[in-house]
Image: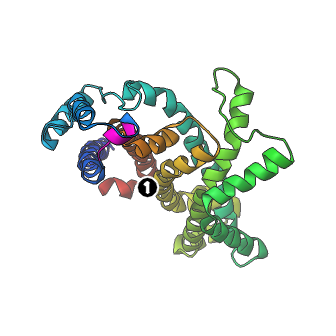
Amino acid sequence: MIPFLLRRAVAAVVLVAIVCTAAFFLLFAVSSDPTSALLGNNPTDAQRAALRAQLGLDQPVYVQYLRWIGGALHGDLGMTWSGGQPVLQVLATRLPVTLSIVIGALILSAAVGIVAGLYAGVHQGTAVDRTILGLSVAGFALPSFWICLLLVYFFAITLHWLPATGYVPIERSIDGWLSSIILPVVALSLGCVAALAQTLRTSTIEVYRQDFVRTLRCRGLSERRILFTHVLRNAAPAGLTVLSLQFVGLIGGAVVVESIFALPGIGSFASRSTMVGDLPAVLGVVVVSVIVVVVVNLLLDLAVAWINPKARLL
């Protein structure tokens, strides 16, 4: 297990370095001059030149990259161009909001997707199985923004059960925090639930067709024990792999969900920073998002290796 962990940790560090470097040069390649958005209407050439010199944009790109990566390695992601605040400080206040809905969506997806996938796999061909498959297809097909608006209309506007927008920090009120994240979590998790349910259903059916399952039945083991002790252990790695892939989608989907529900997370921060061309802020979001995704995927890889020892050889 230790060599497997070391290989994954080294690969994670290399991946973070490659993605952050690629993001830096791509953003500088496709971004326009940010001085217009930062200075307002009709800035003079002298004002543009002064601001570019202040931001360091008059230097070669490789010099800017070395300065930025040197600061990032020491925990300094620079200052936001639009607000003059430390990027790391802004992200530290917004990251808990995003993690609340993303991790909540991951937990909800795992709970619902595992139950639905296992039940559909065990009861293949039944009406419940076909219903779960139909709902999974709908979960893939429906756009996330439409689901958000639908949830707001029914549960916030019509029934008045939950707030339509806003976020309450958990340290202020646990009940208020739960109320503010329920709708975003549900909206964000539907696609992940659909993917996990379909994958686990297929994996469960394949495992049930294996010879060792028939052998276990011949030995007199109960169906419950066969399912939860043997079938689930062999079907789980495929589900965990899907969860690791879907986590990236959850981070990306948070941008839409946070904008609709007016949540002060890194997704809405990234959206606004992109509109004004605030490159340090966008790069800070990329760095933090990549680190979160890599850490979560590393934990899921360890879970897969613990369940399936053969995975440690990869």
Q: How many marks?
A: 1
Residue lying furthest top in this view?
A: 172
Quadrant, the N terminus: top left
Quarter of the image holding residue 72? Answer: top left
On the image, the x and y values in percent for residue 206 come to: 54, 73
Q: Looking at the picture, which amino acid does disc 1 mark?
A: Asn
Range of the magenta residues? 33-38
On the image, the x and y values in percent for residue 87 come to: 38, 29
127 lies above or below 256: below
Image side of residue 275 versus residue 68, left or right: right
On the image, the x and y values in percent for residue 67 come to: 18, 32
The residue lying at 42 percent from left, 48 percent from top is 297
Q: Nearer the viewer, residue 281 or 299?
A: 281
The residue lying at 56 percent from left, 42 percent from top is 103
The question of residue 310 being in magenta is answered with no
Quadrant, the C terminus: bottom left
Q: In terms of secondary structure, where does tag 1 sit?
A: loop
272 lies above or below 118: above
Residue 222 seen in this snapshot = no
Image side of residue 253 versus residue 296, left or right: right
Residue lying furthest right in this view?
A: 159
Q: Nearer the viewer, residue 69 or 202?
A: 69
Magenta stretch, main secondary structure, is helix
Residue 158 seen in this snapshot = yes
On the image, the x and y values in percent for residue 246 come to: 50, 56
Q: Which residue is mark 1?
A: 308
Quarter of the image holding residue 184? Answer: top right
Q: Give neighbour class at mark 1: few <14, some 14-19, many 20+ (Cα, 10 Å).
A: some
The residue lying at 28 percent from left, 36 percent from top is 44
